[in-house]
Amino acid sequence: MKPLARAFFDRPAEVVAKDLLGAMIVSTIGGCRTSGVIVETEAYLGFDDPASHAYRGRRHAGNLNLYAPPGPWYVYLSYGIHWCANLVTGNPAAGAAVLLRAVVPQEGVPVMRRRRGKAPDRHLADGPGKLCQALGITRREDGLLMSRSALRVGLVGESPAGGIVATPRVGITKAADWPLRFLRTTGSASGGRARGD
C-alpha cells in the first residue's frame, strides 16, 4: 500500500472526500491488523458549513485538531455513543475535514466480527460508528498524523471501476441538502442508501 502524503489532504474537503473513495484504510490498533476499502465519505467544509464542528470558527477542547495543518485524524464521540473518524483537510483556518462513513472489510474480518458483536457481515462497517468499532478506532487517534498512528490510509493499485454519486449528507439537520456525501456506484457497502448508524 502506498501511504497518502500530507499534500493529498492539502486540498478542499469535497475534493479529498471523492479521492478517498477506493483507498484502503489499515488499522493495527490493539495489535490486530484490520483493513477495508473506503466506499463512502462526507465532506464538512468548516467555517462556512453550518453542519461542521468548526462553523463560524467555533473552538473548544474537543475540536482543536480540526485547525491543525492538513493530514491528522480528527476523532470525536457522536451523541456520546459512536466514535467517528475524520481526516483534516485544506486551510487550517477553515477547520474542514472528511468523515469516513463506510468501508468494505478486507483483512481481519474475524476481529471485526468480535468487535461488532452480533452484527451481520454486511453491516460490519457500513456506517461511521460501525466503521470505527470494527477497526478499533477511538479518541486515542485524535490529532495523530498517519506516520505516528496505528491507523493509515493509502492507495492500492488503480481506483476501482464505477462512478461516484453525490447525495445529501446523512443524520444532520443543518445544511442537510448540501450534496457532500460521496459513494461509489459499484462495490459499496452502503448500497447507495441514505442511512445513518
Image (tube, rainbow, N blue to C red):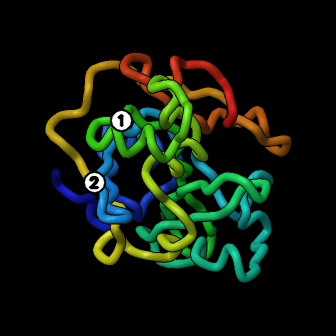
Amino acid type, label 1: Pro
The x and y percentages for residue 96 are 59, 62
Relative to 23, residue 177 above or below: above
Q: Quadrant of residue 23?
A: top left
Q: Is residue 36 left or right of residue 170?
A: left
In this rendering, does residue 77 appear at all? Answer: yes
Q: Report the residue at 43% width, 23% height from top.
A: 188
Any mark on residue 33, and which? Answer: 2
Amino acid type, label 2: Arg
Labels 1 & 2 near each other (Cβ < 8 A)? no
The x and y percentages for residue 97 are 56, 59
In this rendering, does residue 49 appear at all? Answer: no
The x and y percentages for residue 122 are 47, 23
Q: CA–CA distance between discs 1 and 2?
A: 11 Å
Q: Is residue 64 left or right of residue 16?
A: right
Q: Report the residue at 55% width, 19% height from top.
A: 192
Q: Which residue is mark 1?
A: 105
Q: Report the residue at 57% width, 69% height from top.
A: 139
- In the picture, the quarter occupied by the C terminus is top right
Q: Report the residue at 55% width, 30% height from top.
A: 119
User: For the view shown, which residue lies furthest in the right direction?
Assistant: 173
Q: In the image shown, does 118 or 19 lie closer to the viewer?
A: 118
Relative to 162, residue 148 above or below: below
Q: In the image shown, does 40 or 19 lie closer to the viewer?
A: 40
Relative to 132, residue 94 above or below: below
Relative to 93, residue 164 above or below: above
User: For the view shown, which residue lies furthest in the bottom direction?
Assistant: 61
